[in-house]
Image (cartoon, rainbow, N blue to C red):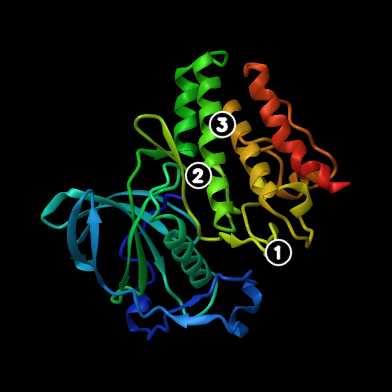
Amino acid sequence: MYSTITNGLSRSAKRRKLRLMCIDLTGDIEKNNEENSPNKYEFADIKDSCKIDYNGELIEFNVKQLINIKKLGEGSFAVVNLTKLEQRSDVIFACKRMTLEDHGNNNYTSQSDLKAMRAVGNDRHPHIVHFYAALIDLTDGQIIICMEPLETSMDKFYPIIHSHFKPNNILLDLFITRLAKHIVLALDYLKSKNLIHRDVKPQNMLISRPIIFKLCDFGICGILKDSVSSTHLGSLRYLPPERLGNVCSYGTRSDMWALGMSLLEISQGHLPLASEPIMSFMAQMKNGWQPDLPLTLNENTRDLLSLLYRFVFSFLF
């Protein structure tokens, strides 16, 4: 997710003594058992300053030098700003700020996001957003993740596509096919690191020039054990039927379903069953809902979408 934060998040944190900890993601994490987990350790290596390689130049900066330019977006636990360095307007980041609390989802998300970004964001994978550094803002009680900035996210871009292209335009079909390929490559790379994303959706798909798509937001990324995970997180409208209300293990096929929902949403210009209340939506999913694939897409692309749904749906019965 591209989200933004103003430095005003949780001002009460200024007066709070924070205990900065991270969950060890070498195993699956259950949020409800976080306090009893033996896998906690202090985040002693994160400071309010850092030194990074920025396009071949070694630069050093601190939290106070980060100047917000504009808000890129926000989610439940964080906001992301387009940020420049003071007196260095050529150094630009997408800075994700997350307020640290002593307990709760904020800590879980920030810890998971940072651990995953360190695991995959340093490798310069062409379809995963690049990670530069993590800093602690002790004044506002926030962790800051500095990433490469991209043009926009797909949830903001696909309405532009539909307002400028006719539904049967071949460019839309090529666009969907390219997007699918790039996100699958990103998910395959995560799997090679024994990770599952768990929150694949248009908001977490970024686009740059030329047309390159990258996956972002690893705040609820999970560890795969023997290709399955058991922690139950994610955006409800992108979860496969077998995960809606059920406690069961799942694997990368869950991300494939979410990718299918995302591609269908982007191709038709709206989320499937978007007008349905969430309980009705969940009931239809669990009772065998199958998508009406846009006939404006070519046969190969429709077959791809069908496979993304069938691949997961067959595990229901």
Between discs 2 and 3, the one toward the N terminus: 2
Left or right side of 296 for 152: left
Name the one closer to the observer, 84 or 69: 84
Query: Circle 3 is placed at which residue position?
Result: 266
Quarter occupied by residue 67: bottom left
Residue type highlighted by circle 1: Ser
Taking the view exactly as shown, the residue that stands out farthest to the right is 317
> Which element type, helix, strand or loop, lies under badge 1?
loop
Query: Circle 1 is placed at which residue position?
Result: 230
Name the one closer to the observer, 80 or 190: 190
Q: In this view, does 133 lie above or below 279?
A: below
Label 1 CA crowd tier, 10 Å (few <14, some 14–19, many 20+): some
Name the one closer to the observer, 78 or 208: 208
Task: Give me the residue at 14% from left, 58% from top.
Answer: 86
Quarter occupied by residue 20: bottom left
Residue type highlighted by circle 3: Ile
Task: Give me the residue at 69% from left, 47% from top.
Answer: 253
Label 3 CA crowd tier, 10 Å (few <14, some 14–19, many 20+): many
Q: Tell me where residue 296 appears, x and y as whole percent.
A: 63, 16
Q: Tell me where residue 188 appears, x and y as whole percent.
A: 57, 46
Query: Circle 2 is placed at which residue position?
Result: 203
Q: Is residue 8 above or below residue 211?
A: below
Of the residues tagged 1 and 3, which is closer to the observer? 1
Taking the view exactly as shown, the residue that stands out farthest to the left is 87
Between discs 1 and 3, the one toward the N terminus: 1
Residue type highlighted by circle 2: Gln
Q: How far apart are marks 2 and 1 (CA)?
A: 24 Å
Q: In this view, does 31 lie above or below 271?
A: below
Label 2 CA crowd tier, 10 Å (few <14, some 14–19, many 20+): many
